[in-house]
Amino acid sequence: MDLNNKKLEWNEKYSVGVKELDDQHKHMFDTINELLDAISNNNTEEHLGHIIETLVKYKVFHFATEEKYFEEFHYEEAEEHVSKHKEFNEKLTKMKEKYPTFSVDFAFELIDFLEDWLIDHLMVTDQKYKKCFHDHGLK
């Protein structure tokens, strides 16, 4: 199964203008693409599970990074943004309950969810903190 045409490509329009956060977003793109490769190569559920766990742990790290800056800079829309992070976590928890093992079906549903959520989150929600972060010297 060739999933190369489904791969996510970073585009500068996704940038929030903060290298640390852009690098984290790019890492999430890379991990989603790694998951697509694993499915294409018919990797084992164990391998899929490892990639998924890596993605979940990285998501926790990334959200914590953003939220640290929200607090530090007294970002006005922090509560709304954090609620989006919570919605993401709830959806992911429901998906993990639906698929008790890291099956290919789970991987596909996860990829669809992540692609839609990540692109929307980058293009809309994350863009809102750009000015606040820049005003506080974060680049």
Image: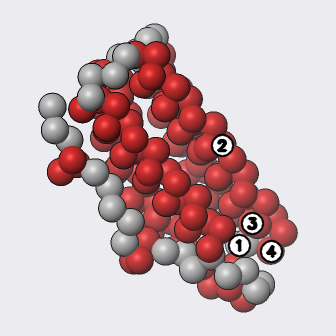
Identify whether 99 is placed above or below 11. above
Q: In this view, does 124 lie above or below 116?
A: below
Q: Is the Cβ of the residue at disc 3 closer than 8 Å to that at disc 4?
A: yes
Q: Nearer the viewer, residue 120 or 110?
A: 110
* Image quadrant assignment for residue 113: top left
Q: Which is closer to the viewer, label 1 or label 2?
A: 2
Q: Residue at x 40, y 16 (%)?
A: 45
User: Distance between the Cα atoms at labels 1 and 4?
Assistant: 9 Å
Whole-percent x, y for residue 129 in the image: 61, 74
Judging depth in this view, the residue of 16 and 54 nearest the camera is 54
Left or right: 121 with respect to 70?
left
Q: Badge 1, how many Cα within 10 Å: few under 14, some, many 20+? A: few
Q: Calculate the distance from the C-alpha at mark 1 to the C-alpha at mark 2.
A: 22 Å
The residue that appears at 80% across and 72% down in the rendered structure is 74
Disc 3 marks which residue?
70
Distance in Å between CA atoms under marks 1 and 3: 8 Å
Residue that badge 1 annotates: 76
Q: Do we see residue 86 in this rendering? A: no
Which amino acid is tagged 3?
Phe
* Left or right, 113 with reference to 47: left
- Residue where numbered disc 2 is placed: 60
Identify the mark nearer the N-term, 1 or 3. Answer: 3
Kind of residue at badge 4: Phe
Find disc 4 in the rendering and name its residue. Answer: 73
Instruction: Identify the element where label 2 is drawn.
Output: helix
